[in-house]
């Protein structure tokens, strides 16, 4: 299943848990169009460093770039010695409700910690909507959704994520209409991580494109400033010219250096 070494269903069986846009595509190019039941795909390093990373890919909460922002990221991380886990989470819609992605991410964190494969720390890498989801793990769980024990990562990497500019009243584009489906907009309205941070946030590495036409760079500044105001350590890199969704495969552009910068930062944080 997408070249994974481990397959952990979060609920029920993994068979038939998700739908691929092209079942014949290589794992590195996989796109998930529907998730019936969430699944955690594990990728093992040759030389484990005792730490793990949960990988949350983007897709606007209506799809998952499971290859470019999942499998490719996991393989970069395993080369560094991390156990990497790609989460194929449910999407927010009428059948799941707005909390489904966060509920799945929190359960994934619990499972990874319980595995014993993250004895020296568990981090999260999230890109695009997956970056919003990653940041939600260090924010208050909405009271209207019930009560959940926090699943705070020890380190956070966020790229080109819509942190809060999709939320009602906080958009950059004037009179921006609600995003369909209703549950997706409800998720963005209820979870604005920069305004709802839990105390003692973990160190964060944040990357954005200054000219991103899809996710305004203001999101990166909002998250960075909120983390610093909360007493956290946050490093923000803004690349002047890069496409949205740059991930790991933009050769020849300055933004392609971000994984090397992130590796240096992880060493500085004693997490590598």
Image (tube, rainbow, N blue to C red):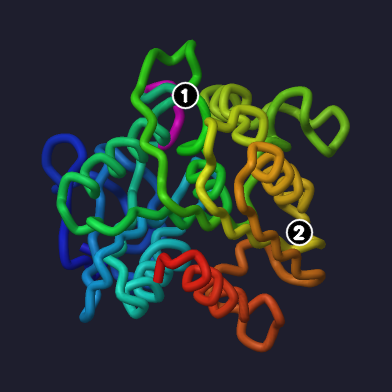
Question: Badge 1 local density, few (<14 within 10 Å), some, or many (20+)?
Answer: many
Mark 1 touching mark 2, by CB under 8 A? no
163 or 203: nearer the viewer? 203
**Is any atom of residue 219 visible in this view?**
yes
Q: Secondary structure at mark 2?
A: loop
What residue is drawn where x is 66% and y is 29%?
195
Residue to which mark 2 is pinned = 212
- What is the x, y in percent for residue 169? 78, 23
Is 139 located above or below residue 214 in the figure? above
- Write down the quadrant of residue 261 in the picture: bottom right
The residue range painted magenta reads: 91-95
Say if the magenta span includes residue 142. Answer: no
Q: Position of residue 175 (x, y in %)?
A: 85, 28
Q: Earlier in the sequence, mark 1 or mark 2?
A: 1
Give the dominant element type of the magenta stretch: helix, strand or loop. Answer: loop
Q: Dot 2: within a 10 Å radius of its alpha carbon, few (fewer than 14), some, or many (20 or more) residues?
A: some
Tag of residue 141: 1
In the picture, the disc for residue 127 is: none
Q: Is 127 displayed left or right of 116 in the figure?
A: right
**Seen from this angle, which residue lies furthest right?**
174
228 with respect to 33 (left or right):
right
Q: Residue at x 30, y 75 (%)?
A: 81
Front in this rendered view, residue 132 or 89? 132
Residue 145 x %, y %: 43, 15
Front residue (pair 153, 216): 153
Q: Secondary structure at mark 1?
A: loop
Going by the image, does 91 lie left or right of 185? left
In the picture, the quarter occupied by the N terminus is bottom left
Tell me the residue at 64%/37% (across/down). 230
Quarter in which the C terminus is drawn: bottom left
- The answer for how far apart the CA atoms under marks 1 and 2 are is 29 Å
Q: What is the x, y in percent for residue 225? A: 73, 44
């Amino acid at each position: 299943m997408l070249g994974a070494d481990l397959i952990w269903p979060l609920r029920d069986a993994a068979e038939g848990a998700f739908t691929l846009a092209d079942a014949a595509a290589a794992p590195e190019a996989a796109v998930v169009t529907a998730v019936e039941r969430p699944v955690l795909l594990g990728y093992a390093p040759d030389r484990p460093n005792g730490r793990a990373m949960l990988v949350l890919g983007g897709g606007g909460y209506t799809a998952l770039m499971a290859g470019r922002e999942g499998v490719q990221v996991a393989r970069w991380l395993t080369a560094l010695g991390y156990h990497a886990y790609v989460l194929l989470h449910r999407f927010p819609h009428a059948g799941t409700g707005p909390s489904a992605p966060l509920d799945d991410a929190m359960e994934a964190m619990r499972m990874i910690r319980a595995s014993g494969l993250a004895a020296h720390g568990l981090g999260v890498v999230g890109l695009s909507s997956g970056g919003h989801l990653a940041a939600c793990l260090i924010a208050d769980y909405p009271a209207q959704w019930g009560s959940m024990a926090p699943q705070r990562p020890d380190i956070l990497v966020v790229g080109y994520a819509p942190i809060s500019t999709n939320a009602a009243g906080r958009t950059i584009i004037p009179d921006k209409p609600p995003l369909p489906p209703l549950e997706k907009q409800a998720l963005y309205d209820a979870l604005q991580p920069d305004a709802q941070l839990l105390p003692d946030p973990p160190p964060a590495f944040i990357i954005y494109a200054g000219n991103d036409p899809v996710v305004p760079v203001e999101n990166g500044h909002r998250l960075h400033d909120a983390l610093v105001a909360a007493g956290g350590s946050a490093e923000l890199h803004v690349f002047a010219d890069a496409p949205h969704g740059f991930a790991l495969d933009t050769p020849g552009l300055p933004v392609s250096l971000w994984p090397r910068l992130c590796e240096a930062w992880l060493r500085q944080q004693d997490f590598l």
